[in-house]
Protein backbone atom coordinates (compact mmCIF):
# COMPACT_ATOMS: atom_id res chain seq x y z
CA UNK A 1 0.00 0.00 0.00
CA UNK A 2 1.04 3.58 -0.35
CA UNK A 3 3.05 5.13 2.45
CA UNK A 4 -0.04 7.18 3.24
CA UNK A 5 -2.27 4.16 3.44
CA UNK A 6 -3.52 5.19 0.02
CA UNK A 7 -3.85 3.10 -3.06
CA UNK A 8 -0.37 2.93 -4.58
CA UNK A 9 0.74 -0.67 -4.66
CA UNK A 10 4.41 -1.33 -4.80
CA UNK A 11 6.63 -4.29 -5.20
CA UNK A 12 10.31 -3.79 -4.56
CA UNK A 13 11.64 -2.26 -7.72
CA UNK A 14 12.09 0.72 -9.89
CA UNK A 15 8.83 2.65 -9.85
CA UNK A 16 9.10 3.13 -6.10
CA UNK A 17 11.99 5.43 -6.89
CA UNK A 18 9.76 7.58 -9.00
CA UNK A 19 7.20 7.83 -6.25
CA UNK A 20 9.78 8.61 -3.59
CA UNK A 21 11.17 11.37 -5.74
CA UNK A 22 7.75 12.78 -6.29
CA UNK A 23 6.93 12.68 -2.62
CA UNK A 24 10.20 13.91 -1.20
CA UNK A 25 11.78 16.38 -3.53
CA UNK A 26 10.87 20.05 -3.31
CA UNK A 27 8.02 21.18 -5.50
CA UNK A 28 9.06 21.97 -9.03
CA UNK A 29 8.41 25.51 -9.99
CA UNK A 30 6.06 26.16 -12.83
CA UNK A 31 9.08 27.16 -14.87
CA UNK A 32 10.96 23.92 -14.35
CA UNK A 33 11.06 21.81 -17.51
CA UNK A 34 10.24 18.74 -15.39
CA UNK A 35 7.29 20.26 -13.52
CA UNK A 36 3.98 18.48 -14.01
CA UNK A 37 1.65 20.18 -16.44
CA UNK A 38 -1.76 21.41 -15.36
CA UNK A 39 -4.53 19.63 -17.25
CA UNK A 40 -8.28 20.07 -17.35
CA UNK A 41 -10.73 17.40 -16.23
CA UNK A 42 -13.07 16.60 -19.14
CA UNK A 43 -15.33 13.96 -17.59
CA UNK A 44 -15.72 11.86 -14.45
CA UNK A 45 -17.68 8.63 -14.05
CA UNK A 46 -18.22 6.93 -10.72
CA UNK A 47 -18.69 3.16 -11.01
CA UNK A 48 -18.98 2.11 -7.36
CA UNK A 49 -18.22 3.66 -4.00
CA UNK A 50 -14.65 2.29 -4.47
CA UNK A 51 -13.90 3.07 -8.13
CA UNK A 52 -14.17 5.93 -10.61
CA UNK A 53 -12.78 6.88 -14.02
CA UNK A 54 -11.87 10.30 -15.35
CA UNK A 55 -10.58 11.86 -18.54
CA UNK A 56 -8.28 14.87 -18.83
CA UNK A 57 -6.75 16.95 -21.59
CA UNK A 58 -3.57 15.59 -23.18
CA UNK A 59 -0.74 18.01 -23.89
CA UNK A 60 0.45 17.85 -27.50
CA UNK A 61 3.96 16.98 -26.36
CA UNK A 62 2.91 14.13 -24.06
CA UNK A 63 3.87 10.79 -25.63
CA UNK A 64 3.44 7.33 -24.11
CA UNK A 65 3.27 3.68 -25.07
CA UNK A 66 -0.03 1.88 -24.43
CA UNK A 67 0.20 0.17 -21.01
CA UNK A 68 2.49 2.72 -19.33
CA UNK A 69 1.87 4.73 -16.17
CA UNK A 70 2.45 8.37 -15.28
CA UNK A 71 2.35 10.56 -12.19
CA UNK A 72 -1.02 12.21 -11.56
CA UNK A 73 -1.91 14.54 -8.73
CA UNK A 74 -3.19 17.71 -7.19
CA UNK A 75 -1.46 20.66 -5.58
CA UNK A 76 -0.81 19.77 -1.92
CA UNK A 77 -1.67 22.00 1.05
CA UNK A 78 1.84 23.49 1.12
CA UNK A 79 1.98 23.99 -2.62
CA UNK A 80 4.08 20.86 -3.04
CA UNK A 81 2.34 18.62 -5.60
CA UNK A 82 0.81 15.41 -4.25
CA UNK A 83 1.52 12.89 -7.00
CA UNK A 84 0.92 9.16 -7.40
CA UNK A 85 1.54 6.69 -10.22
CA UNK A 86 -1.50 5.96 -12.36
CA UNK A 87 -1.72 3.59 -15.30
CA UNK A 88 -2.98 5.37 -18.39
CA UNK A 89 -6.19 3.63 -19.46
CA UNK A 90 -6.55 5.31 -22.84
CA UNK A 91 -4.57 4.04 -25.84
CA UNK A 92 -1.52 5.92 -27.11
CA UNK A 93 -3.39 7.37 -30.09
CA UNK A 94 -6.18 8.97 -28.01
CA UNK A 95 -6.38 12.78 -27.91
CA UNK A 96 -7.42 12.64 -24.25
CA UNK A 97 -6.01 10.74 -21.26
CA UNK A 98 -8.18 8.36 -19.25
CA UNK A 99 -7.56 6.96 -15.76
CA UNK A 100 -9.39 4.42 -13.61
CA UNK A 101 -8.91 4.96 -9.90
CA UNK A 102 -9.75 3.46 -6.58
CA UNK A 103 -11.17 5.75 -3.87
CA UNK A 104 -9.47 5.53 -0.52
CA UNK A 105 -11.54 7.47 2.05
CA UNK A 106 -8.50 8.68 4.02
CA UNK A 107 -5.95 8.54 1.16
CA UNK A 108 -4.27 11.95 0.83
CA UNK A 109 -4.68 12.00 -2.95
CA UNK A 110 -7.70 9.86 -3.82
CA UNK A 111 -9.87 11.29 -1.04
CA UNK A 112 -9.58 14.61 -2.92
CA UNK A 113 -9.23 13.30 -6.46
CA UNK A 114 -12.55 11.45 -6.22
CA UNK A 115 -14.24 14.85 -5.84
CA UNK A 116 -12.97 16.30 -9.13
CA UNK A 117 -15.50 17.67 -11.58
CA UNK A 118 -15.25 18.60 -15.27
CA UNK A 119 -13.35 21.87 -15.58
CA UNK A 120 -11.14 21.24 -12.53
CA UNK A 121 -7.36 21.06 -12.89
CA UNK A 122 -5.14 18.05 -12.18
CA UNK A 123 -1.37 17.70 -12.43
CA UNK A 124 0.16 15.38 -15.03
CA UNK A 125 3.79 14.24 -14.93
CA UNK A 126 5.76 14.77 -18.10
CA UNK A 127 7.17 11.28 -18.47
CA UNK A 128 5.47 7.90 -18.63
CA UNK A 129 7.11 4.56 -17.99
CA UNK A 130 6.25 0.94 -17.30
CA UNK A 131 6.74 -2.69 -18.19
CA UNK A 132 3.25 -3.60 -19.43
CA UNK A 133 4.23 -2.76 -22.98
CA UNK A 134 4.59 -4.81 -26.13
CA UNK A 135 8.28 -3.97 -26.29
CA UNK A 136 8.88 -6.05 -23.14
CA UNK A 137 7.41 -9.23 -24.65
CA UNK A 138 8.79 -11.49 -27.35
CA UNK A 139 6.42 -12.39 -30.22
CA UNK A 140 3.68 -14.93 -29.46
CA UNK A 141 0.23 -16.02 -30.59
CA UNK A 142 -1.95 -15.49 -27.52
CA UNK A 143 -1.76 -12.56 -25.11
CA UNK A 144 -3.14 -13.01 -21.59
CA UNK A 145 -3.92 -9.82 -19.64
CA UNK A 146 -4.59 -10.80 -16.02
CA UNK A 147 -6.10 -8.06 -13.83
CA UNK A 148 -7.86 -7.45 -10.53
CA UNK A 149 -9.79 -4.32 -9.55
CA UNK A 150 -8.45 -1.12 -11.11
CA UNK A 151 -5.48 -3.15 -12.36
CA UNK A 152 -7.51 -3.43 -15.57
CA UNK A 153 -6.48 0.18 -16.41
CA UNK A 154 -3.31 -0.49 -18.43
CA UNK A 155 -5.14 -3.24 -20.30
CA UNK A 156 -7.92 -0.80 -21.18
CA UNK A 157 -5.16 0.96 -23.06
CA UNK A 158 -3.67 -2.17 -24.61
CA UNK A 159 -6.95 -3.66 -25.90
CA UNK A 160 -7.71 -0.39 -27.70
CA UNK A 161 -4.33 -0.33 -29.45
CA UNK A 162 -4.32 -1.75 -33.00
CA UNK A 163 -0.73 -2.89 -32.46
CA UNK A 164 -2.02 -5.50 -30.00
CA UNK A 165 -4.01 -7.25 -32.71
CA UNK A 166 -1.15 -7.03 -35.19
CA UNK A 167 1.10 -8.84 -32.74
CA UNK A 168 -1.32 -11.45 -31.37
CA UNK A 169 -3.96 -13.72 -32.86
CA UNK A 170 -5.98 -13.85 -29.65
CA UNK A 171 -6.18 -11.55 -26.61
CA UNK A 172 -7.61 -12.83 -23.32
CA UNK A 173 -8.46 -10.16 -20.75
CA UNK A 174 -9.28 -11.57 -17.32
CA UNK A 175 -10.76 -9.32 -14.66
CA UNK A 176 -11.36 -10.43 -11.08
CA UNK A 177 -13.16 -8.15 -8.63
CA UNK A 178 -14.63 -8.44 -5.18
CA UNK A 179 -18.09 -7.31 -6.32
CA UNK A 180 -20.10 -7.56 -9.53
CA UNK A 181 -20.45 -3.75 -9.82
CA UNK A 182 -16.67 -3.43 -10.02
CA UNK A 183 -16.66 -5.30 -13.34
CA UNK A 184 -18.70 -2.57 -15.04
CA UNK A 185 -15.83 -0.41 -16.29
CA UNK A 186 -14.33 -3.38 -18.14
CA UNK A 187 -17.70 -4.60 -19.38
CA UNK A 188 -18.56 -1.19 -20.84
CA UNK A 189 -15.14 -0.91 -22.39
CA UNK A 190 -15.22 -4.32 -24.04
CA UNK A 191 -18.80 -3.72 -25.28
CA UNK A 192 -17.69 -0.46 -26.87
CA UNK A 193 -14.80 -2.05 -28.74
CA UNK A 194 -16.89 -3.39 -31.61
CA UNK A 195 -17.75 0.22 -32.54
CA UNK A 196 -14.18 1.41 -32.20
CA UNK A 197 -12.96 2.85 -35.53
CA UNK A 198 -9.44 1.48 -35.10
CA UNK A 199 -9.89 -1.95 -33.50
CA UNK A 200 -13.60 -2.67 -34.06
CA UNK A 201 -12.92 -5.26 -36.74
CA UNK A 202 -10.53 -7.11 -34.44
CA UNK A 203 -12.82 -7.03 -31.39
CA UNK A 204 -13.93 -10.64 -31.96
CA UNK A 205 -10.35 -11.73 -31.19
CA UNK A 206 -10.64 -10.39 -27.64
CA UNK A 207 -12.07 -12.65 -24.92
CA UNK A 208 -13.25 -10.98 -21.70
CA UNK A 209 -13.16 -13.48 -18.82
CA UNK A 210 -14.64 -12.22 -15.54
CA UNK A 211 -14.62 -13.66 -12.04
CA UNK A 212 -16.04 -12.26 -8.80
CA UNK A 213 -14.94 -13.37 -5.36
CA UNK A 214 -17.27 -11.87 -2.76
CA UNK A 215 -20.70 -11.91 -4.41
CA UNK A 216 -22.65 -14.49 -6.38
CA UNK A 217 -21.53 -14.62 -10.03
CA UNK A 218 -21.54 -17.33 -12.65
CA UNK A 219 -17.82 -17.65 -12.05
CA UNK A 220 -17.32 -17.01 -8.36
CA UNK A 221 -13.66 -17.65 -7.62
CA UNK A 222 -10.18 -16.19 -7.95
CA UNK A 223 -8.56 -16.31 -11.38
CA UNK A 224 -5.61 -18.17 -9.87
CA UNK A 225 -7.97 -20.96 -8.81
CA UNK A 226 -9.36 -21.07 -12.36
CA UNK A 227 -5.80 -21.50 -13.63
CA UNK A 228 -4.85 -24.15 -11.10
CA UNK A 229 -7.94 -26.30 -11.58
CA UNK A 230 -7.84 -25.86 -15.36
CA UNK A 231 -11.27 -24.24 -15.62
CA UNK A 232 -9.84 -21.16 -17.35
CA UNK A 233 -8.36 -23.21 -20.18
CA UNK A 234 -11.44 -25.45 -20.49
CA UNK A 235 -13.71 -22.40 -20.67
CA UNK A 236 -11.49 -20.79 -23.29
CA UNK A 237 -10.97 -24.00 -25.23
CA UNK A 238 -7.20 -23.53 -25.27
CA UNK A 239 -4.30 -25.59 -23.90
CA UNK A 240 -2.71 -24.51 -20.57
CA UNK A 241 -0.04 -21.78 -20.59
CA UNK A 242 2.72 -22.63 -23.03
CA UNK A 243 5.90 -20.54 -23.41
CA UNK A 244 6.01 -21.34 -27.12
CA UNK A 245 2.82 -19.42 -27.90
CA UNK A 246 1.52 -17.60 -24.82
CA UNK A 247 2.54 -14.18 -23.53
CA UNK A 248 1.31 -12.73 -20.24
CA UNK A 249 0.86 -9.31 -18.63
CA UNK A 250 -0.30 -8.99 -15.01
CA UNK A 251 -1.60 -5.96 -13.08
CA UNK A 252 -3.58 -5.62 -9.86
CA UNK A 253 -3.49 -6.90 -6.30
CA UNK A 254 0.08 -7.54 -5.23
CA UNK A 255 -0.81 -10.98 -3.87
CA UNK A 256 -2.44 -11.86 -7.17
CA UNK A 257 0.61 -10.65 -9.09
CA UNK A 258 2.87 -12.86 -7.00
CA UNK A 259 0.60 -15.88 -7.34
CA UNK A 260 0.23 -15.51 -11.13
CA UNK A 261 3.95 -14.95 -11.48
CA UNK A 262 4.54 -18.27 -9.69
CA UNK A 263 2.00 -20.09 -11.87
CA UNK A 264 3.40 -18.53 -15.03
CA UNK A 265 6.97 -19.42 -14.13
CA UNK A 266 5.87 -22.95 -13.27
CA UNK A 267 4.50 -23.18 -16.83
CA UNK A 268 7.97 -22.27 -18.12
CA UNK A 269 7.50 -18.60 -19.04
CA UNK A 270 10.29 -16.16 -18.23
CA UNK A 271 9.91 -12.59 -17.01
CA UNK A 272 10.71 -9.85 -19.50
CA UNK A 273 11.53 -6.16 -19.30
CA UNK A 274 12.01 -3.25 -21.66
CA UNK A 275 15.74 -4.04 -21.77
CA UNK A 276 15.29 -7.77 -22.11
CA UNK A 277 11.95 -8.86 -23.62
CA UNK A 278 10.65 -12.32 -22.66
CA UNK A 279 7.37 -14.14 -22.08
CA UNK A 280 5.61 -12.37 -19.20
CA UNK A 281 5.65 -8.96 -17.53
CA UNK A 282 4.17 -7.59 -14.31
CA UNK A 283 3.64 -4.02 -13.23
CA UNK A 284 5.55 -3.14 -10.14
CA UNK A 285 3.66 -0.04 -9.16
CA UNK A 286 0.37 1.56 -9.97
CA UNK A 287 -2.48 3.28 -8.26
CA UNK A 288 -5.08 0.64 -7.75
P1 LIG B 1 -10.59 -12.03 -2.66
O1 LIG B 1 -11.92 -11.35 -2.51
O2 LIG B 1 -10.69 -13.52 -2.55
O3 LIG B 1 -9.53 -11.46 -1.76
P2 LIG B 1 -8.54 -6.14 -3.88
O4 LIG B 1 -9.82 -5.36 -4.01
O5 LIG B 1 -8.21 -6.52 -2.48
O6 LIG B 1 -7.39 -5.51 -4.60
O7 LIG B 1 -8.79 -7.52 -4.62
C1 LIG B 1 -9.27 -7.53 -5.92
C2 LIG B 1 -9.56 -8.94 -6.30
O8 LIG B 1 -8.33 -9.68 -6.33
C3 LIG B 1 -10.47 -9.65 -5.31
O9 LIG B 1 -11.48 -10.32 -6.04
C4 LIG B 1 -9.54 -10.59 -4.59
O10 LIG B 1 -10.14 -11.81 -4.17
C5 LIG B 1 -8.54 -10.92 -5.67
N1 LIG B 1 -7.30 -11.42 -5.11
C6 LIG B 1 -6.67 -10.98 -4.01
N2 LIG B 1 -5.55 -11.69 -3.79
C7 LIG B 1 -5.49 -12.61 -4.77
C8 LIG B 1 -4.56 -13.64 -5.08
N3 LIG B 1 -3.49 -13.87 -4.33
N4 LIG B 1 -4.80 -14.38 -6.17
C9 LIG B 1 -5.89 -14.16 -6.93
N5 LIG B 1 -6.80 -13.21 -6.69
C10 LIG B 1 -6.61 -12.44 -5.61
Image (cartoon, rainbow, N blue to C red):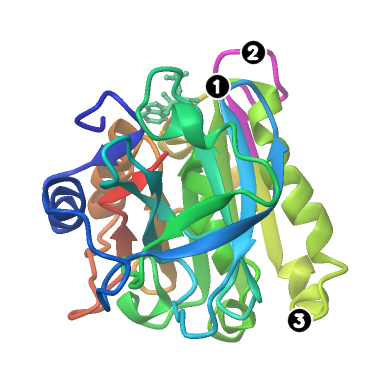
Magenta residues (range): 210-220
Q: Position of residue 38 (x, y in %)?
A: 47, 62
Nearest to the observer: residue 123 or residue 152: 123
Q: What is the spatial separation of the Cα atoms under label 2 and label 3, in whole angstroms?
A: 35 Å
Label 3 vs 1, first from the N-terminus? 1
Nearest to the observer: residue 115 or residue 210: 115
Instruction: Note whether 209 is above or below 111 in the view shown.
Output: below
Q: Circle 3 is placed at which residue position?
A: 198
Disc 1 element: loop
Q: Circle 1 is placed at which residue position?
A: 178
Q: Is residue 158 left or right of residue 242?
A: right
Q: How many C-alpha atoms fall within 10 Å of the one at disc 3: few (<14), some, or many (≥20)? A: some
Nearest to the observer: residue 288 or residue 234: 288
Label 2 vs 1, first from the N-terminus? 1
Label 2 vs 3, first from the N-terminus? 3
Residue contact between numbered discs 2 and 1, judged by CB atoms under 8 Å? yes
Q: Is residue 235 visible?
A: no
Q: Circle 2 is placed at which residue position?
A: 215
What secondary structure characterizes most of the magenta part?
loop
Q: What is the spatial separation of the Cα atoms under label 3 and label 1, in whole angstroms?
A: 32 Å
Mark 3 beta carbon near ligand 1 (under 8 Å): no
Quarter assignment of residue 268: bottom left
Disc 2 versus disc 3: nearer the observer: 3
Amino acid sequence: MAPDGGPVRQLPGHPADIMTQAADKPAETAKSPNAPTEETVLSVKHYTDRMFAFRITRPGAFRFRSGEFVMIGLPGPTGKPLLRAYSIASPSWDEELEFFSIKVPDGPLTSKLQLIQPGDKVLLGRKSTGTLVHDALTPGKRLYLFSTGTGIAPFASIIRDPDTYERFEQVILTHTCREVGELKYGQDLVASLKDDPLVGEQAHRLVHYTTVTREPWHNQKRITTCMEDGQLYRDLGVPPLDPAVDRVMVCGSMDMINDIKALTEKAGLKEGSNASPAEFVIEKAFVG
